[in-house]
Amino acid sequence: MSPQREKPPAGPGSADASATGGFGKPRRTNVRSGTIASSGRAGRTSPASQVIPDQVANRMARRVALATGLPTLMGMGVFVASYLLVSRHILEIPPSTTLLASGACFLLGLLGLSYGVLSASWEEQAGSLLGREQIGVNIGRIRASLQAMRRGSDGGVS
């Protein structure tokens, strides 16, 4: 067995950026959870308070799958329908029309991603079928969270 050499501690100018979380402040590993925390913000929130409950995550995933999946399938369907109509000489469709129609469907799918997350109830109990009333509530929660993060990164100075 060969003796192992100790690595010198990684400093700000060191090439070993993994020990410092980039080239900034040194990081500490939380032994219990195995997470790495920056030394400037360690201990402000507990990991248990940041976990999304399974019910809420599943609800979001279902809404996202529907709100993105259906428009995406429609976008692919536009290509297939356009090909069939043009190849069988049923209808003459310009390629730009096919591109715009499928692009609109894919854009709708992208918007569906946000809708799926924002329309889901973030509480334990389920909301309504479409979840329109939850969008305003959830956007307010995101704004409050972003403001709290900004205040925290400014060192508490407003």
Image (cartoon, rainbow, N blue to C red):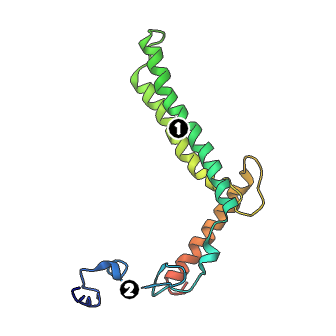
Task: From this view, report whether residue 156 is shown above or below residue 48.
Answer: below
10 Å crowding of disc 2: few (<14), some (14-19), many (20+): some
Nearer to the camera, 37 or 109: 37
> Which percent across, then down, holds residue 135?
68, 56
> Which percent across, then down, holds residue 70?
59, 37
What type is the residue that disc 2 sits on? Lys
**Figure quadrant of the N terminus:** bottom left
What type is the residue that disc 1 sits on? Thr
Q: Residue furthest front?
A: 1
Task: From this view, report whether residue 51 is shown above or below residue 92.
Answer: below
Query: To which quarter of the image does residue 66 belong?
Result: top right
Per the image, the residue denoted by label 1 is: 72
Disc on the earlier residue, 2 or 1:
2
Nearer to the camera, 70 or 58: 58
Q: Describe residue 19's horizontal placement relative to residue 116 as left or right.
A: left
Look at 26% across and 88% down and name the residue there. 7
Per the image, the residue denoted by label 2 is: 25
Look at 45% across and 87% down and name the residue there. 39
The numbered disc on residue 47 is none
